[in-house]
Each structure stands twice: as C-alpha cells, then as structure tokens.
Amino acid sequence: MTQATWSGVEVRGRPQVSLWSLTIFAASVLILLIFSEGWVFPLRGDANNTAFDKLIPLGYLPAYAAAAFLFFLTPASVFQALIRQPFLIALMLIVGVSYFWSTAPDITARRIVAVYATTLGGVVMAARYRWAELAEVFATAFAVLAVISFVMPLALPSIGVMHELFPGAWRGVWADKNALGGIMTLGFCILSAAAMLNPTRAMIWWPFAALTVLLVIMSTSKTSLVSVILGLGGLMFVAIVRRGPGISVAASWLAMLGLVMALCVGLFASDLVFKALGKDATLTGRTEIWTAAMHQIEKRPWTGYGYSAVYDDTSRWGPRAKIVKEAGWAPHHSHNTWIEQWLALGVFGLAAWALTFLQTVTLAIVSIYRDQGAYLAVPFLIVYGLTSLTESMAVNYNDFRWVIFVALAVKLCWPDREVRT
C-alpha cells in the first residue's frame, strides 16, 4: 500500500496517521453508510411506519455534506478525473434535462439534486484515493454493515429476521432477505479485494469477508450465493492472470471457454438454471413487469418519462398505474437496470448508460493485465452486471451501490500516479 496518502508524515519509514487523514477517511465511510440505507428499515419496520417519513430525507444530508466537503478539498483533481468519463457526464446531463419533459417535474427536480449528490460521492473518492486505499474505504463500510447485520437478527429478531414471507430468513437491517444477500455479496467482493490489495492487513479483512458469506447463507438467497461464487471466481482469475504471461494466456482462454459454456447453458437449458435457483420462468413476476414497462416505453421511446418520474408518481393515470394494472402487482422499480433507464431517460439516456457501463467494463478487463485495481473492479462488476439484469441498480439516488460503481468507473480512468491529496 502507498502510505503517503494516509499519513502526510513519515517517521523512520513508517506512517503516522494524522487526525486530518482520519477525518477524510471517516467522511468517505460516512457517505457509504448513509447511502446503504441500513438505518431506514429499522425506523419504519414491517408495518412501514410513516411517522419518520418527513425525517428520513434529512438523514441523507450529512452524506451530501460529506461529498461536498471532499470535493472542495481537491476540486481540480475531481474535475480532471471526471472528464475522463465523458459518457457518465452525458448520462448526468440527460438526467438533468429530463426535468423538461418529465411527467412529474416536481419529483424529478428533487431526485436530480439527490442523484447528483450521490454521484459526486463516488467521483470524489475516485479522485482522492489510490486503489488500495479505496478498497479499504469501501471495506470499512461493509465491515460495519456486516457486523450490524449479524448482531441484529440475534439481538432484535423482530427486525433482523423475516416472519411472514420466508420465515426464519435473515434480513439484517434491510426490508427483505434478498437485499441482505445482494449487499453482502458485493461486500464479499470488496472485502476480499481489500485483503488482496493490502496484504499487511489481510488478516483483518478476510474474517469480515467470511462473515459476509455467512450472512448470505443465513439470508437463504440462492441467487446471492451463486453471485458470491462468481465474484470469488473473478477474484481468483485476476490473481492467476497476474502471476505471469504464460499462465495469463492459459487462464484467459479457459475463462473465455467457461463464459461460452455458461451462455449456452443459459440459452438452451434455462429451465435447469431456474430449478437450481428455486426460481420460476417469470423470475418471481419480473417478466410481467418488463412487459408492462416496455408497453409504456413504446409510447415515449425517445424521451422516456423523466428521471424518477414513473414509480414515484402515485397518480391514477400515470405510467406506474398502467404498469401495476398490467403486471398485477405494485413494483417499486422495473427490476431491470436497462429497462429502467429507457423508461426514465429514453433512447439517449439508455445509450449513455450503456456506453458508461461498456467503457467501465472494458477498462476493468484491461486492468486485469495492467493494474492492481482489477482486484477491486472485476469481482464487483461481475456481480453488479449480473444483478443489473433483475434489479434497477444504476443512476439511483441515495444508493451506495451507485456510489461504488461511479467510483470504480472514474478510478479506472484515473491511475494511482495521478492521485493528488
């Protein structure tokens, strides 16, 4: 690990951590913890208590302030790092101008501010930290969440354990077991990467990585367990490739063969996959949502309905009402990142997101052979990319998964040698 960023002071070759560096580190972790929303469900509970609804939006303000604080420390570096992700800039501009054609402009206006603040949190971290340090910022937040999610079912099972649907399944501090499983899967990827990138502190991060696997098991989410295996496979692939050119070529060919085989199984034996995961062919009703959402997209394919203007609009005549009527139940999002962008931002928004994702994935693949950042980026993007097919995970306001994706997307364009603190 490069120590100079943390310390600012070197004593006999060993870093001396300053209060200022700890303050910056704490601000970064605070952003992630607040955007994890691990504090929202314990306030609302299963009964969806609305008593705190007016206070919950205020709970995000410290994260916005922390992102602004980190930005004003090094604004030049932030701009220089961000400018290398032109598609992300285009995506954010489309989000902003969608206000002018939004079917719910008041909602869109508020959400634009929120998503800009959320995105800023990822950009400032990418501009400030080197790979090893960025991994430990993320890992610290996930370690805290993992510990709380382990304690909650034991200390307060009324909150930490599901009782009506999937009784006995752990959900930690989120509303359902799948949320716990999905977040801990990402946590496993990040904590494992922190251990690989910081070998002197590996014995700190590996136990937390093991704890996230335990939480995935306790959540009983088979999809999350498969994602853990895929994330581990990505981490192992990076480690093998970086051992030398000869083994790198062999591992790359085997990875390509495995990918082709997985695609063939998915295309020609999907029933076996669904059966193994305990899913039906509709993916628990998701295909009905996709069909209903696509019918609404057909009416406004070029512009969409405006950022966050569909599922936050509870009017009787809006697109959400029509989706609910056709799908037969009331979803909170499209359960597909790609459909979500098209529905909200139109063709150009979908294209901007697709190009952002493609650039990020391409740079992550290149980093496998050139940059240690692959340990962090590749496993995360494997899980994130697969999950994006069944969940809406991109361009989300107040969502730490979006913060992490943005941080990785920008950091892959901003090498360690250009970090200035």
Image: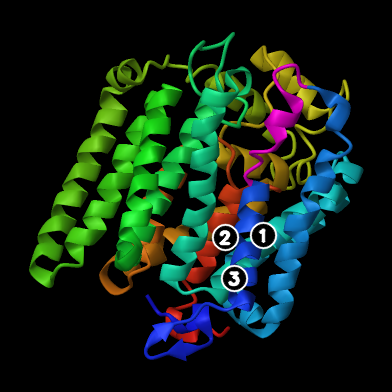
Disc nearest the viewer among 3 and 1: 3
Q: Which residue is mark 2?
A: 406
| Depth order, front residue of 126/366 | 126
Q: Is residue 316 above or below residue 252?
A: above
Could you say which disc has been placed on residue 380 in the image? none
Looking at the rendering, the stretch of residues picked out in magenta corresponds to 36-48
Q: Determine contact: label 2, label 1, CB under 8 Å.
A: yes
Distance CA(mark 3)–CA(mark 1): 22 Å
What x and y, as percent, mark residue 282?
A: 48, 17
* Residue type, numbered disc 3: Leu
In which quadrant of the rendered view does residue 403 lie? bottom right
Q: Earlier in the sequence, mark 2 or mark 1?
A: 1
How crowded pointer 2 is (Cα within 10 Å; few <14, some 14-19, many 20+) is rated as: many
Q: What amino acid is at disc 2?
A: Val
Front: mark 3 or 2: 3
Within-10-Å neighbours for mark 3: few <14, some 14–19, many 20+ = few
User: Cα distance, mark 3 to mark 2?
Assistant: 23 Å
Residue plotted at (81% across, 57% down)? 97
Judged by its main secondary structure, the magenta piece is: loop
- Vertical side of 7 occupied by 361: above or below: above
Image: 156 above or below 179: above
Q: Residue at x 57, y 75 (%)?
A: 127
The residue under label 1 is 119
Quarter the N terminus occupies = bottom left
